[in-house]
Image (cartoon, coloured by chain):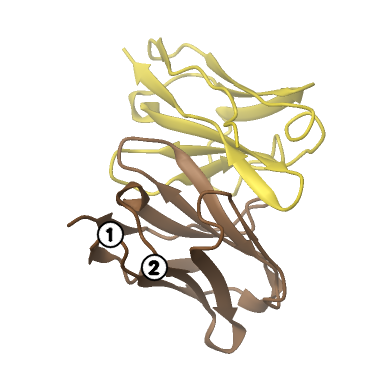
Chain colours: A yellow, B brown
Amino acid sequence: QSALTQPASVSASPGQSITISCTGTSSDVGVYNFVSWYQQYPGKAPKLIIYGVSNRPSGVSNRFSGSKSGNTASLTISGLQTEDEADYYCSSYRTTYTWIFGGGTKLTVL
Amino acid sequence: EEQLVESGGGLVQPGGSLRLSCAASGFTFSTYWMTWVRQVPGKGLECLANINKDGSEEYYVDSVRGRFTISRDNAKNSLYLQMNSLRVEDTAVYYCARDLNYNGPWGQGTLVTVSS
């Protein structure tokens, strides 16, 4: 199964905003509103930060937002903080009860 | 607090077997689909297997179908992953997670190392 496509890395300075893209197909991102985003620090389990394309779990900062257009979903982080430096993964439901993940994006806050 | 705790990881030889467990607490386990996800060290995430609420339906990714079996015991609030015919490339951290479509917890992960 092909993974969703994410940029390998992005970088920005504190206070700036960044957007991470997640490109799928008409069999996953393009047809289902079940896109999630995860934040992962080294050696830690992934933490859900966005589900259902644009919903934030309780306790997740409103600096994190999600959206989708066609086959591409996006995660935007505004007002970057040094603590946002982590790996970010997208996932989407795909037909026949499977879920597919992106390859991950390493965010560096300079 | 909704929580998932994995156990059962360890070192196993190629061709060997291992059974992972995932203990759920803080929510009504029997009302959710459950999933096993793995992560090869330094690599991305891979959804391996999913099971429906009562355990009557199971779905697998191609790389583990026929070797791994997902199951659950709703009376014990537990999820399992029986792994047979293990390969070196199965070395990874294994996570259990609740219904990937919605807001649900993940476990802390358990490391499985397949090596001679």
Q: Is mark 2 on a helix, strand or loop?
A: strand
Give the x, y percent position of residue A29.
Answer: 73, 31
How much space separates mark 1 and mark 2, taking CA atoms?
A: 22 Å
The numbered dot on residue B14 is 1
Task: Judge whether A93 appears above or below A71 on screen.
Answer: below
Q: In this view, does A73 lie to the left or right of B45?
A: right
**Residue occupying image coordinates x 32% and y 63%:** B15
Identify which residue, B7 or A53, lies in the foreground.
B7
- Ranked by sequence position, the earlier of labels 1 and 2 is 2
Q: What element carries label 1?
A: loop
Task: Judge whether B30 appears above or below A45 on screen.
Answer: below
Residue reaching furthest to the left: B116
> How many numbered marks have been drawn onto this rendered protein structure?
2
Residue B28 appears anywhere in the view: no
Residue reaching furthest to the bottom: B75
**Picture quadrant where residue A85 is located:** top left
Image quadrant where one finds the C terminus of chain B: bottom left
- For label 1, the crowd category at 10 Å Cα-Cα, with few meaning under 14, some 14 to 19 and many 20 or more, is some
Give the x, y percent position of residue A88.
Answer: 47, 31
Report which residue position mark 2 lands on. B6
**Residue occupying image coordinates x 57% and y 31%:** A3
Q: What residue type is labelled 2?
A: Glu
Q: Which amino acid does label 1 sit on?
A: Pro
**Residue occupying image coordinates x 36% and y 60%:** B86
Task: Judge whether A92 appears above or below B36 on screen.
Answer: above
Give the x, y percent position of residue A33.
Answer: 77, 38
